[in-house]
Amino acid sequence: MRQLTYILLFVSFQIFAQDRTFLSIDSLPKNGILLKDGWEYKQGDNLSWANIDNKEAGWKKIDPTKEIYNLPEIYDDKIKWLRLDFQITKKLPKALGMAVTQAGASQIYLNGKLIHEFGHFDTDPSKVKAFDPLQNLIYLPADSFGNYRLSVRYTLQPNIRYTDIFGLTKNQFFKAILFDLIPTQHAQMNFRVYFKGIDVFILGLMFILFFIHLAFYLFQKKNKLFLLFTAYLLCTTILRAFKIIGQNQNFVEDRYYTLNIANWILSVVVIFVATIFYNISKERVDKYYYGIIVYFIFYAIISSFSYGFQWQNVLLLIGTIFNFFVLVRLTRVGVKKGIKGFGTLSTVLFFAILGLICITISMRFLNYGITPIGYNELKYGISPYFIDAFFTFGSISIPIGLSIFMAIQGNETNKALSKQLAENETLKNKAIDHEREKQLILANQNETLEKQVSERTAELNQSIETLKSTQSQLIQSEKLASLGELTAGVAHEIQNPLNFVKNFSELSVGIAQDLNEELSRPEVDKAYVKELLHDLTQNQEKINHHGKRIASIVTGMLHHARTSTGKKEPTDLNALVDEFLRLSYHGLRAKDSSFNAKIITQFDPTIGKIDVVSQDIGRVFLNLINNAFYAVQLRAKNVKSADPTSKAELYEPTVTVSTQKIDNTIVVKINDNGTGIPNAIKAKIFQPFFTTKPTGDGTGLGLSLSYDIITKGHDGSLDLISKEGEYTEFIISIPNNQETK
């Protein structure tokens, strides 16, 4: 560096120097001059203190380059002044610069003139914003020999958490270094380009790896490892971005919050790394894994409340070593298991962790720092660029090592797939050969099989015809059984009107005889004759009425017995239900004269006539009503047989039949208080040939045919509600799309 020599100051300077001690500056080394000695401080605020001729007493000696925590006498949010008197005894470069590091807000004065302000300085503490210039150079107009006073009006931001975690400085109270401005600016620019270039390189590399593995995950979403690694790279990228932002953040409070977020992200990154290693080593999570999670969450919380003490750095170093131990252990497990790629990964991991430990120790404990023109040397003489190389390698080696490992794994997978494809091809050829042999065998056996198939087909057709015949016979048997029950009811119904016809016929004969006798007399009693004719007419009307009743019953029986045409016709459903209810009851009474039951009818008069196949619907009603009477009759017998002397009369067999119109649906309910149906057989009740009646009492086709008539023939539904030992209710629902009244 150029140095210009000038003669000593004149006598006037010597006289002035007798009053105060001045820091003498006669040269300017390449690395600058640290203004450390000769500083004084004073609490209070007086702008006149910045003047060089101010000689007010009460100033105290201080070394402001110490960290703020080591200066308890001025560690407060009150305004205070720092001053340094210096003299330039020789000609220095005209462009004199000063690099400042501080933890508060300040105003810089030279000989009473304000030359720069760092941060937001204000007499109101609530408006103060602490500012760290990060050693950016400012111009110092002290370019000639003479006496100067450098004054600093200074205050700290209240309620701020100062921290040195990840910072480029140690949060020194106030540190000033004098430099030759022009060459230092060039050196600083080159250094910052170098420093930021490394950061940008690492950040860009993280971005590239993130997008590559994201693409891998999108193509192989089933591979959980790709998802973990993608998330890890994303967090690593964000962490790097936050560190770059935080390290270049001038406002101390903003840097604090930014870097504390980075601490939390760092903890997440470490946890992701541990998770990935547990996955790729195929090792179950254990106490070490949970220990890493708990430890780094604790570290993140502690760092958030850090006040610049060094013990959080100890925590980081301990955590790094602990994580290194776990990862080495998992690497050994992977190597023992013979997992491809773990040998390469273990080498990369060793140097990565070693580099991170070295950089942690150097930056946190060996006074490693950065000057405006580059790195400071370590106090043990180690090159900082060597340490920086370790740091750069440590930052990128883990993601690169994991990427190499996954590439090796992908290659091994491809090899395995290729081998599998080759084996599949071999198996395919063998299968083709085997198929050809089978085809030859099948060709030889084809004629034999065709003959056997023809014979079996003929036998099957014969069996089908036999089955159809049997089925028709069973269905006809069911119809005949229902017809027999109907006939018994019809016989009972016909018997009553026939008795009336017989009785009235006999009465009519007697009346006719009396009429003839009266007419044969010489004197005919016309009044008596009229009475006899009136009685005869009434008898004939009653005979005619009961004759029509008999004809109606016979017509209904024939109508029921006739084969269904399948044509729907308007039918009075209430009348149809009522008719078959009576016929069924009287049919059962014909078999068992001792049987009695209470019949309740609840017919909806608004139903009118609906389009149904009356023969088929009649069979359904008859079948369900017969089952209802059978159930109440069986329960009555069971009650009586259980205890003939009991209060059997308390049980009253009851059958309830109701009709109801609900919107466009006709609902018919047939309810009995009989034996009920067990839950175990409810699902089978509509199956063909399933019956609970004794052998000979039923075919098991009644409910099956009824179900088909309602569901298939009339697009309705037939449902069952029952409780064993208490009741059974069949619910018929028939759609009434076209009503005819």
Image (cartoon, rainbow, N blue to C red):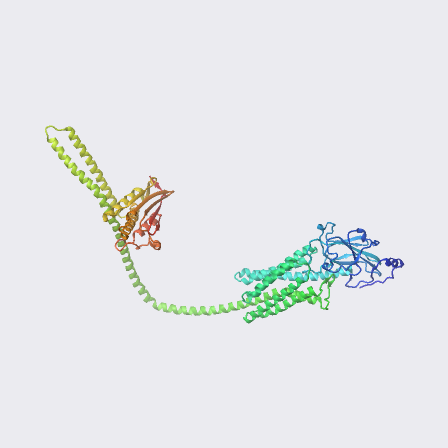
Percent of width and height locating residue 95: 80, 58
Percent of width and height locating residue 512: 14, 35
Quarter of the rendering containing residue 532? top left
Q: Judge by depth and name the residue closer to the eye, 563 or 453.
A: 563
Q: Residue furthest right?
A: 11
Q: Judge by depth and name the residue closer to the eye, 685 or 144.
A: 685
Seen at 55% across and 67% down, the residue is: 281
Quarter of the rendering containing residue 259? bottom right
Percent of width and height locating residue 89: 84, 61
Which quarter shows the C terminus?
top left
471 relative position to 96: left or right: left
Percent of width and height locating residue 286: 55, 65
Seen at 44% across and 69% down, the residue is: 429
693 relative position to 23: left or right: left
Residue 551 visible (yes or no): yes
Residue 565 visible (yes or no): no
